[in-house]
Image: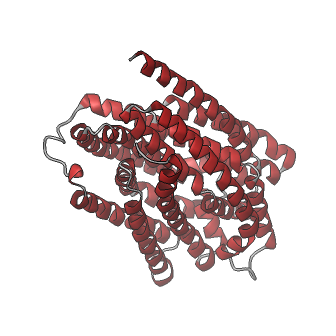
Amino acid sequence: MTKGSPYRLMIAFAVPLILGNIFQQFYSMVDTIVVGRFVGVHALAAVGATSGFNFMVIGFAQGLTMGFSVIVSQRYGAKDYSNMKKAYAMGIYCSLACALLISFFFTIFSKPLLELVKTPADIIDDANLYVSVIYIGLTAVVYYNLFSSILRAVGDSKSPLIFLLLASVLNIVLDLVLVIVIPLGCAGVAIATVVSQMISAVSCHVYMTIKYPMFRLSANDFKIDLFLCKRLLKIGLPGALQFSVCAIGVVIVQAAINNFGSDTVASYSVGTKIENVITVVYPVLGMAVSTFAGQNLGAGDIKRITDGFKAATVLMVAATVVTTILAHVLSEPLAYLFVDKDSTDPKIIEDCVFYVRTLSYFFLFLGSIFIFRTGCQGLGSGTVPMISSITELIFRTITAFTLPDLFGYVGVVLASPLAWVAAGIICPICYKFLINSIKAVDKWQ
């Protein structure tokens, strides 16, 4: 990404990722659809009630590995392949350590955490069963994200798409087998998710080793380098923590939703699934500008970095027009995929559609967050992502504790959008300070 039109490069990079993320969200949706249609609305609500904690651990994995890939991207841009391999090897160590630690903690405390957010009594056991399986299999999720992030760091966004397709197909097949043929209920869809991620992670690693000689690690590459591990964690942990901090806000909103009962939890769960599908373009554009910025920082081309952010912003605004239209057109048809129309309370669908359409008016701010927060991470900043995440957490917390009492369900729906507004404004300001500091350093070198 150090040569050529930023627009062309980012679009070429983003298209496979958008398709991949759609498939990733699709098989996440399949979990919910299979549970909703073949087990029942209460089981659907149970899976949905775990979304905040699920986002916390999976988002931690994504943020961590994306941070690790920043150094790989920078070394690749500088054509320093020896240190790139070393960073990759240390990333494998750091990923394992973090995954085991997080997996152990959340598996032990899964039910107390669900009780803390007042998960309805009629769904808490199924919710705990589902999320515990996800936590136990976290290592597979972490490594899948690591290998995919490393491939994207060197500009290969097509190969991760192939492995996402593999994971999607496997997950769908296993969902049907473990819920319909072998009636394991909520545990079945969780097992399907973990197994599909594990197979995709192994396949991705084998592919990388065969396809790219620069990723064939030697014993020397695996000699522990504490300084490099510290550097990886310095970038990776803030990225991981920013997801976790955001997830705390999501958990707080989930707690507010739980007070309205399991039917409202089901509406909200379906709404968030639809939201995630419609908004896949934003994290993808964030990944594109992060890779672009990291490689050009490694190449020492500061002007090209600013051109990349401008291009990403234009693409994000164009995408916002499309996603807003899609939210209004597709929200109701998609909602009916999850439940049986004849046997479901129409209020569940109405609340779901209201949620998605309301959020669509704030998508521009969500896009701003991903462009500038993830882009700044590509420049090696852990501070900007953390400032953004803390801002989101503060505003989600304030709104979740005040607006529901004043406006009921509408107040809960507004919690996330108002947090997006605050963080979406502050992120570009932080980027401006960061790029000016980089320019100042470059000027005096």
Residue lying farthest to the right in this orientation: 406
- Quadrant of the image for the C terminus? top left
Name the residue rendered at 58%, 73% in the picture.
Answer: 35
13 left or right of 313 in image:
left
Q: Is 119 rendered above or below residue 243?
A: below
Q: How many marks?
A: 0
Residue lying farthest to the front in this orientation: 4
Viewer-proximal residue among 410 and 69: 69
Q: Is residue 414 visible?
A: yes
Residue 303 pos. (x, y %): 49, 32
Residue 218 pos. (x, y %): 14, 47
Name the residue rendered at 73%, 58% in the picture.
Answer: 324
- Among the 4 quarters of the image, the one containing residue 48: bottom right
Q: Is 392 rendered above or below residue 331?
A: above
Viewer-proximal residue among 12 and 324: 12
Residue 164 pos. (x, y %): 43, 65
Residue 122 pos. (x, y %): 65, 63
- Among the 4 quarters of the image, the one containing residue 270: bottom right
Name the residue rendered at 49%, 36% in the picture.
Answer: 305
401 left or right of 304 in image:
right
What coloring was used for the rendering?
A: secondary structure
Q: Is residue 112 visible?
A: no
Residue lying farthest to the left in this orientation: 219
